[in-house]
Amino acid sequence: MDLSLESISEIVSHMRAIGTDTEHCEVKAAASGVPKTLIESVCAFANGSGGLVLLGLSEKDRFAPVPGFEPKSARDALISIAGKLTPVCRLHAEILMLEGAPIVAAWVPAIDPSARPCYITERGRYSGAFIRTGDGDRRLTHYEINRMLENLRQPKYDLEPVPEASLSDLNTAVIAKVIERQKLLSPRIFGTFSDADIQLRLGILAKHDGKLVPTLGGLLACGIYPQQFFPRLSVLFTIYPGNSKAGGAVRYLETRNIAGSIPEMLRETLERVASNMRTGAIVDTGFRQDVPDYPIRALREAVANALQHRDYSPEARSSAVQVNMFSDHIEVLSPGGLFGGASIDDIAPGISATRNVNLSNILESTPFEGAGQGFVVENRGTGLFLIRKELSDALMPAARITNALSYFAISFGKRTLSEAERNPKRHLSTREAILAALRTNESLSVKELIEMSQLSRGAISSHLRSLVAEGLAEPTEIAKSPRQRYRLVRRSGTDN
């Protein structure tokens, strides 16, 4: 952090403009000594992304310097405060002259995620740990502290046996396909094992009291109805009439608790979204293309990631993944923030830590029938990259991402209507559309026309044959040439 006078002056000017200190800056007058509550702010900054402490300014007097402020004693007291934390916080403090008066500026660095939570030693870990929220400090909950401590080890909640469940609670058809996939991927490892051994090694099954039972991850990936044992490990799908959950006489237009295995919840969630969003049309070179409010592949990735990476600890099993549709955006929210101290900057290039390693491994081989058929996840750390690409290709703004200790949220803004959708014109027939496309291109291949029109090869080929027979279009190569293209037949200086 830059503690130069120029930088501090800019920060003070900003706070004067907004009338308050900020999430990243705590201001205290400290005219009669450093207040006891300042230690909570230092602790909160250490548990977050760091923060700035300014002493010797009065917030109630528009952040004017405080008369009679003793900077040396204030700086020493602040450094002493940092030593009363576990782990000790090594802050950097400077005495500066601002507008002719002394102040103390100190940067509180973020504690390494592996050492969190930072807490006030004399109060203990569960009573003395704080986090910055807005312009204030909030005591961390037991849940949030446990998630921080979880970063010190790999969680294995997905490997927990579920003794109340039996093998009959698993979908045998899905299990067979998972086993088939694993044998294909690793024939030398799984080729010699029995199906039961493979399920044990994959973590679909576990031994409990001398018998085989499904694991939590096994039920979620391959179960028939996991909610029989974990009622809230579901997707809560809700449609709101406005742009937020608050306000209005009607709280929501529709709400549905979507249950089943992860592939089933993913499929039904995408179907619910698709059936409740608008589909517009863009006419490009004569062809009409349907364009939905939200790219379905981006939504598929967001929901799949939420179900794959959410917190499955006992404390979080009463919370569902939420998919909230608003008038101007859609939000996917999952319990538990990014695992392992990862940040949004880390996951942008595909670098991320996996909270549920076992479940993720199973989902890589779990078949999915729906939008983007194949397997439920790829587990290659490319989810955010794919989402960004889909939104970019749809000429839509980037997703808004929020990462907190207790939740992770990703939000997509609704696609705005194009000029063509606001003022629709007469839709061309396929024949007319092909002619219009050929007028604007020197030549086109069948493949290019298929991509432009989203029609089948048979439909495009049939129309091209008719246009050639009518003398309106002609091939550029001999029949059956792999380089075949088509162009308009030019007559008397016209293109018709």
Image: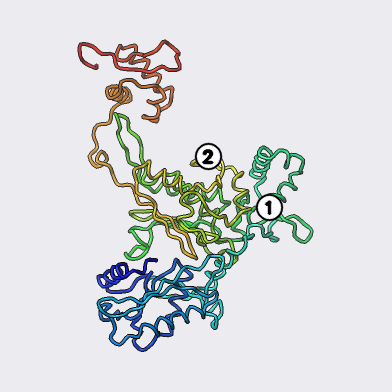
Can residue 271 be seen?
Answer: no
- Is residue 12 or residue 120 the one in the foreground? 12
**Position of the C terminus by quadrant:** top left
Residue reaching furthest to the right = 210
Q: Whole-percent x and y of residue 77?
A: 44, 83
Q: Whole-percent x and y of residue 178?
A: 65, 43
> Under tag 2, what secondary structure?
loop
Asked which quadrant contains residue 174, the reply is top right
Q: Which residue is mark 1?
A: 203
Residue type at the position of mark 1? Gly
**Residues at circles 2 and 1 in contact by the CB criterion of under 8 Å:** no
Circle on res. 125: none
**Position of the N terminus by quadrant:** bottom left
Asked which quadrant contains residue 474, the reply is top left
| Of marks 2 and 1, the one in the foreground | 1
Can residue 231 be seen?
Answer: yes
Circle on res. 373: 2
- Is residue 186 or residue 181 the one in the foreground? 186
Residue type at the position of mark 2? Gln
Q: Is residue 103 left or right of residue 261?
A: left
> Under tag 1, what secondary structure?
loop
